[in-house]
Amino acid sequence: MKDRYFAMRAHFLDREVNGECFFKLKELEERWFCSLKNVKRILHQFEESGRLTYVPGAGRGNPSKLTFRDPFQKEVEDFMKDCMENRKLDQAAQLLRLPIPKSWIAKATSDIRDMFGLKRGTESKDVLHAFITRDFTTLDPLKVSISFESHLIEYLGDTLVKYDEKKDTILPHIAHHFESDGDKKWTFHLRKGVFFHHQETLTSKDVAYTIERIKDSEESSHQWLAEDIETVECPGPYKVSITLKKENPFFLRYIASSNFCILPANQAFNEEEWIGTGPFLLKERSENKLVLEAFDHYFLERPLLDELHFYKVSQDAANIVDFTVQHPPTEEVMSKHEIETGFRFLMCNLRRQTVIQHASIRKALYQLMDINRMADDLGWEHWVEASSFVNSRSSPQKKDSETILSLLKEAGYTGEPITIYHMHYQKAFEVADWYKKQGEEYGLNFVLHPFTFPDFYLRDIDEKADLIFMGEVSSLDPHLSFLAAFYNDTLLFRRMFPVDSLQWIDGKLELFKQEDAENRERIMMEIEDHIRKNNLLLFQHHPIKTRTFHPMIKDVMFHSFGHFDFSKLWIPR
């Protein structure tokens, strides 16, 4: 009942005056997902507990009134104190999901940090408690297209082979050896004694099942990874032969993708009971919490941490209580700065017949996107201007705001609304608001719409958005990620680039797959040049991420998609 009570108080916070607020019962019906009868029953229970006084509205349609016994801030602080004294992490995280003022959380920051962070638990367990500020999305290897969830899959499952970013080569993994016969037939020899999380051993049938699952699925965002596969044969329990329709020098890199992690053939895939062979297994999953536990029977080195707990909290709570920090006041926190292996951009939706189709409009939008001025106005400490998918190919872009009005006139723009979609978190709101205000100076009528990651998987925004602020993050294999950006039909490139540009890009990517690393870089530059010349998207910046952590946490390294390598973290005893 406490979760409903606090959610109600947070919802009514802006209208509460001297402990009183007026409301319609319909509001609580929608917020609590229950009937009017149950709303009244719950309010009477709160009244009986002494928390409040409830006065029903006099007559149909008139507002009801609540009078609260204690100020909300006092109730929040008392509840947090009880959570900390009794180690109620789940309940504390539940409260931290609510939109309550930062100052109320800040008063207990050090205590909250002490409760979360990296801890030694019962039975000498080392547990990392982490925060996420949004809903968890799919963990299905067929569908996942968000970097954090893609990163988690790398810990839950394993692939036949693995990409080594330091040597830019493919190494054995579940397959201890592999060979090819003319680049169209590949044979993989599997390790013996590789256990799934449900204690069954992996065989060639599981590999065949996984490949067929990707090939045959009509809902897969990653079917392109298996489209060149003709047949899969299992000559023995530890031997798999894959025949391709045509030679593909990128094939080994394809199957090194985490989307090709091997799943058991004897059990239908279930996101709630994720079964793979990875170093961590899924111990618990709910709407607001995810727990991974080290897999003791992992066929390679066991993780040094025992459990990872991810809690969903509000953005304000996450900003104040950094998820990797748990330190007494006498200790200094450590920091790591890393340029994200990706970039932020403003996508132009060129599948809709709107003003965005006019090249001059997009040129005007490009001139308006002055990332250095944006960073200065918004008080960013670190940023790197982007003109490419990766920092090493980026260079400063010349902007001339004096040409904007003439470009808009050339396009015949007369103030039509231009819808901009952006992510539903604080920094995204700030960026979108800044761009909207800049546009207003030139008569551009931007209409802003926030959206969430679950919304991203839906196609409704394709029919409504003219522009979308978004980001692209690379895995450890930048060349495979470049292909995925254009081949994955869940990502915006495939959804919103014009058909003729995609056809041209697809032709370039076919050449890309046949070339060596140096020539692949050249083709990537050609594609990026095409994007810039046509302003298919507007490059913004490469974020610089700063991570702070307890000085006792050892071997902190960034892994794929710019996240920590959880399998290497440890704490000395």
Image: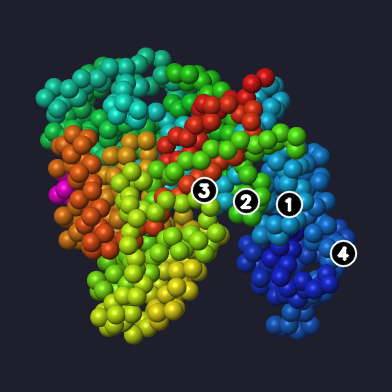
Most prominent secondary structure in the magenta stretch? helix
Amino acid identity at mark 1:
Ala
Residue drawn at x 73%, y 73% as measured from the top left = 15
Q: Nearer the viewer, residue 540 or 150?
A: 540
C-alpha span from label 3 to label 1: 26 Å
Residue drawn at x 66%, y 60% as measured from the top left = 99
Q: Is residue 411 above or below residue 400?
A: below
* Crowd band around label 2 with a 10 angstrom C-alpha radius: few (<14), some (14–19), many (20+): few
Amino acid identity at mark 2:
Asn
Amino acid identity at mark 4:
Arg
C-alpha span from label 4 to label 3: 36 Å
The image quadrant that residue 73 belongs to is: bottom right
| Residue under numbered circle 2 | 319
Q: Secondary structure at mark 1?
A: helix
Question: Which of marks 2 and 3 precedes in the sequence?
Answer: 3
| Residue under numbered circle 1 | 106
| Residue under numbered circle 3 | 136
Q: Secondary structure at mark 4?
A: loop
| Residue under numbered circle 4 | 69
Position of 69 with respect to 366 (left or right) is right
Locate residue 63, reporting x and y percent.
74, 79
